[in-house]
Amino acid sequence: MEIPFTVKPRPDTGLWNAKVGIWLFLASEVMLFGGLFSGYLFLRLGAGGEPDYFWPKDILSVEFGFVNTLILILSSVFVVVAWLQLKLRDFRKFQMWMFAVVACALIFLVNKGFEYKSKFTHYGIKLSDNSIVEGYKLDDTIIYEGLKETTIDVARFNGQFLEKIEGDTPKFFRVDAEGKTQGEAFELSVEKVQEIAKEENDKLREKHEASNKEKIENDSEAAVIRWLPAMGIKQISLVSENEFSIKIKRKKLRRSFPDSVKFRDQTSIKGTISKLTPGVFIAQVDRIDLRATDSETPETSSLVWNYLGNESPYKSGENTNSKNEDQASLNYNEEYQKSADVTDAHDPKKEAEKAKKIFIDSRQEVLDKASSKEVEP
């Protein structure tokens, strides 16, 4: 049985199946997204007052989103016009409108490029009271000094920390289980670690095989375990001739502690954070988010107001935090800011006050509404 009107239009409506199908598809899209957006609006507007959650009206760029949406709509219109010109057999106008479609696509991609670049270079710092500071030009450099004792993971060592040593790279000694140095000092490298591991593994293998041989001599039916690579040496402990310091970005580390540092290749070095460490540094603060803080009065008690604009706590040596956790602080350097952003005056302190005002006003508005509902009979 042949399906009617697949190509030939119906005599009463002038429509054929494909045209009706595409309009049904478009109608279903309108209903789907219309339902999703309507559901979101009803839930958002009808939700009970939350004093710490408000509309992000001062965060999102509505104008930028409007321009991109307009470009998308225009490109759709231009495609339809180009298709119409093609049906009219006017190939030159078809080409012209298709060029307009391609131009819209390029403009859209350029706009998205600016938008994504802004997002990729935008960072956030979460402080210990759950307050969040966001902005641009992040500097998370950390300096460790007084480094000597080093523990290396044989399988993963890639020499990363050697590239970050400030000044001359010292030589290292092997250290036994009691902490005593062994042999002569040597220049540390990936090849040297592999050489040491091979020597130690050969000794362990000979000892293991000798033990198996002794068991068989004593008992011919004794069960023995053959040597496996997993039985080899896992870590090597070293100590340097002289103390050294390293300077590295926090994001390139696995963990940073007040008394030690751990690299991504599992190399662990004991030392202290230098007083010259600037702390986590955001040159252009553009948003402060206090919604997740535990305090009932975050507008006055949050750590953000203690750190914003202050110098590193390590500089004065007053940092007394001894917990083994990643260290973070917030700083602002006015001279760096002037050199970094000449075209657009950008004062993080003023913007912090603006963000604080927006937060307090929005929070107070919701609290007032909640209080008025409580007193209603």
Image: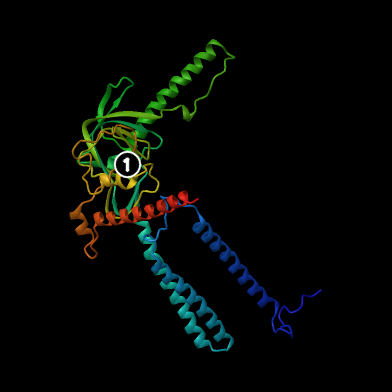
Reply above or below: 42 against 83: above
Reply above or below: 205 against 21: above
Q: Nearer the viewer, residue 40 or 362?
A: 362
Please give left or right for residue 318 compared with residue 194 in the image: left
Please give left or right for residue 51 compared with residue 87 in the image: left
Task: Return the residue found at the far top.
Answer: 218
Residue that label 1 marks: 160
Residue 196 rendering spot, x and y as whole percentages: 35, 30
Which quarter of the rendering shows the N terminus? bottom right
Task: Return the residue found at the far front.
Answer: 377
Please give left or right for residue 207 compared with residue 84 in the image: left
Reply above or below: 250 against 98: above
The structure's colour scheme is rainbow
Residue 128 rendering spot, x and y as whole percentages: 34, 40
Q: Nearer the viewer, residue 281 or 373?
A: 373
| Corner quadrant of residue 71 | bottom left
| Corner quadrant of residue 175 | top left
Q: Is residue 135 visible?
A: no
Residue 56 rendering spot, x and y as whole percentages: 40, 58
Secondary element at image label 1: helix
Instruction: Kindly identify the residue that appears in the image at 25 percent across and 26 percent down.
Output: 184
Q: Is residue 317 visible?
A: yes
Q: Nearer the viewer, residue 330 or 51?
A: 51
Residue 321 rendering spot, x and y as whole percentages: 28, 34
Instruction: Kindly identify the residue that appears in the image at 42 percent across and 55 percent down.
Output: 54
> Please, what is the three-letter code of the amino acid marked with disc 1?
Gln
Disc tally is: 1
Rate crowding at label 1 as few (under 14), some (14 to 19) or many (20 or more) other CA atoms within 10 Å: some
